[in-house]
Image (spheres, grey):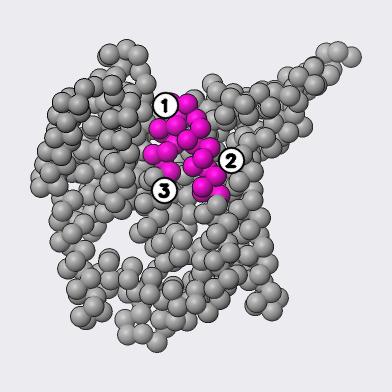
């Protein structure tokens, strides 16, 4: 009888173990391949439901503030979906797959319940991005052939698996992880090694990828790390002054020698001028048109919005009679907060901002290097969202939600999460 009961438990334990490794694998494939990301997440969810200690694990998962915050926003989106259904008089709007992404942190919290598993997930992402980084440099020096898409889209040069903005953002996160490890490492060799990786990542973004969104996200990252290093340092004033001068010289050199000035100042101003004079659909011009139209969409339903998934039909109706409207047609307004305000209203946007504030508060209470890593991820998300809708894009959405789902708990929360297992024992 004992063998008959232990055998199913052993099988369910193996299923749970497989689910934990699938969760880790999803962090590895998210910067590489979309179908593999879906497969890894799907298997992780399935194994979480079929694995051993289901009740105990889900009670523990419920203790995660990350999972709770994501569930709260998922509930807001659900109410917004019902609101859209009501406004359309019973015609069911398109729900889409992005709606379900906010359940992932709960499933991952039921799998990654120890510091060891959280670290494995982050290491998996780090290794995948190292692979991307070295292949990108191989393309730059001619050792690895460029992708075929480069012939029609020059911006995609030196990109490996993703679009150049997606790779640029992920590479910035890689550099932030490396720099965070460099600061906290005890070994001198480890400090230098991680610092070198961080330098290679930032050079890759500034000189090889040339994504304007990544350039914008780089600015607060550099400011954060200057603050972090100076605050941590106990050097004398003259040494701090020397560091400040060196940082200033480095910034000037980057500004003059890299394409940042051309991409952020010269080309953007030219594109805005072309849009204002002749409505040419340049990259900046399209964004201005999107933002202008979205503000008007918000004005027609400011408090509750038009409902989940309703920005696109509203925008299509707004521009359908405009000359060359197809050139200005996009799937989202390229601004995260404008999209939320247009669909969930200003009340929904307020809830979202409060959740972001609570998330930042949690990140700031983590111990280094996790605190530095996740604060940098937060800064990248906020600044990249100024010119893109990250949740509306598969790669951006899964990158940030999976990194969020792998965030460790605070020490006090870890102690609380052990209560169910202790009482069960």
Q: Magenta span has 371? A: yes
Mark 1 neighbour class, 10 Å CA radius: few under 14, some 14 to 19, many 20 or more: some
Mark 2 neighbour class, 10 Å CA radius: few under 14, some 14 to 19, many 20 or more: many
Checking the image for residue 381, the label placed there is 3
Q: Disc 1 and disc 2: Cα gap in Å?
A: 18 Å
Q: Position of residue 37 (x, y in %)?
A: 49, 42
The correct choice, above or below, for 193 with respect to 112 in the image is: above
Residue at screen point 31% across, 35% down? 227
Mark 3 neighbour class, 10 Å CA radius: few under 14, some 14 to 19, many 20 or more: some
Helix, strand or loop status at disc 1:
loop
The correct choice, above or below, for 62 with respect to 270 in the image is: above
Residue at screen point 76% across, 26% down? 420
Q: Disc 1 and disc 3: Cα gap in Å?
A: 19 Å
Helix, strand or loop status at disc 3:
helix
Q: Position of residue 6 (x, y in %)?
A: 80, 17
What span is colored magenta in the figure?
Answer: 355-378
Q: Position of residue 302 (x, y in %)?
A: 54, 73
Residue at screen point 20% across, 80% down? 277
Identify the residue under disc 2.
Answer: 66
Image mark count: 3
């Amino acid at each position: 009888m004992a063998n008959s009961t232990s055998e199913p438990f052993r099988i369910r334990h193996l299923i749970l173990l497989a689910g934990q490794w699938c969760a880790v694998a999803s962090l590895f494939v998210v910067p590489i391949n979309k179908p593999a990301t879906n497969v890894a997440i799907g298997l992780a969810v399935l194994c979480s439901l079929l694995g051993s200690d289901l009740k105990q694990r889900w009670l523990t998962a419920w203790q995660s503030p990350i999972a709770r915050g994501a569930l709260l926003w998922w509930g807001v989106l659900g109410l917004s979906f019902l609101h859209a259904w009501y406004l359309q008089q019973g015609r069911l709007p398109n729900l889409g797959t992005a709606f379900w992404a906010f359940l992932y942190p709960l499933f991952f919290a039921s799998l990654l319940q120890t510091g060891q598993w959280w670290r494995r997930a982050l290491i998996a992402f780090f290794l995948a991005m190292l692979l991307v980084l070295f292949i990108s440099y191989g393309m730059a020096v001619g050792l690895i052939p460029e992708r075929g898409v480069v012939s029609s889209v020059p911006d995609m040069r030196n990109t490996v698996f993703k679009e150049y903005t997606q790779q640029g953002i992920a590479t910035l996160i890689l550099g932030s992880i490396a720099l965070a490890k460099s600061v906290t490492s005890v070994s001198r060799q480890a400090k230098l090694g991680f610092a070198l990786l961080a330098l290679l990542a930032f050079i890759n973004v500034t000189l090889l990828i040339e994504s304007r969104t990544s350039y914008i996200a780089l600015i607060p990252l550099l400011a954060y790390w200057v603050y972090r290093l100076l605050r941590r340092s106990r050097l004398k004033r003259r040494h701090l002054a020397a560091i400040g001068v060196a940082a200033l010289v480095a910034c000037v050199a980057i500004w003059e020698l890299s394409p940042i000035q051309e991409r952020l100042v010269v080309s953007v101003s030219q594109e805005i001028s072309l849009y204002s004079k002749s409505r040419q659909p340049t990259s900046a011009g399209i964004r201005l048109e999107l933002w202008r139209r979205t503000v008007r969409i918000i004005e027609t339903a400011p408090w509750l919005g038009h409902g989940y998934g309703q920005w696109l039909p509203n925008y299509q109706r707004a521009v359908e009679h405009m000359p060359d409207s197809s050139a200005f047609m996009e799937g989202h307004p390229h601004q995260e907060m404008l999209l939320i305000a247009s669909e969930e209203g200003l009340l929904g946007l307020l809830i979202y901002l409060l959740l972001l504030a609570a998330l930042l508060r949690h990140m700031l209470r983590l111990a280094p290097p996790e605190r530095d890593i996740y604060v940098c991820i937060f800064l990248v998300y906020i600044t990249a969202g100024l010119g893109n809708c990250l949740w509306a894009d598969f790669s951006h959405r899964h990158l940030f939600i999976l990194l969020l789902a792998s965030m460790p708990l605070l020490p006090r929360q870890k102690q609380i999460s052990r209560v169910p297992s202790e009482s069960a024992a």
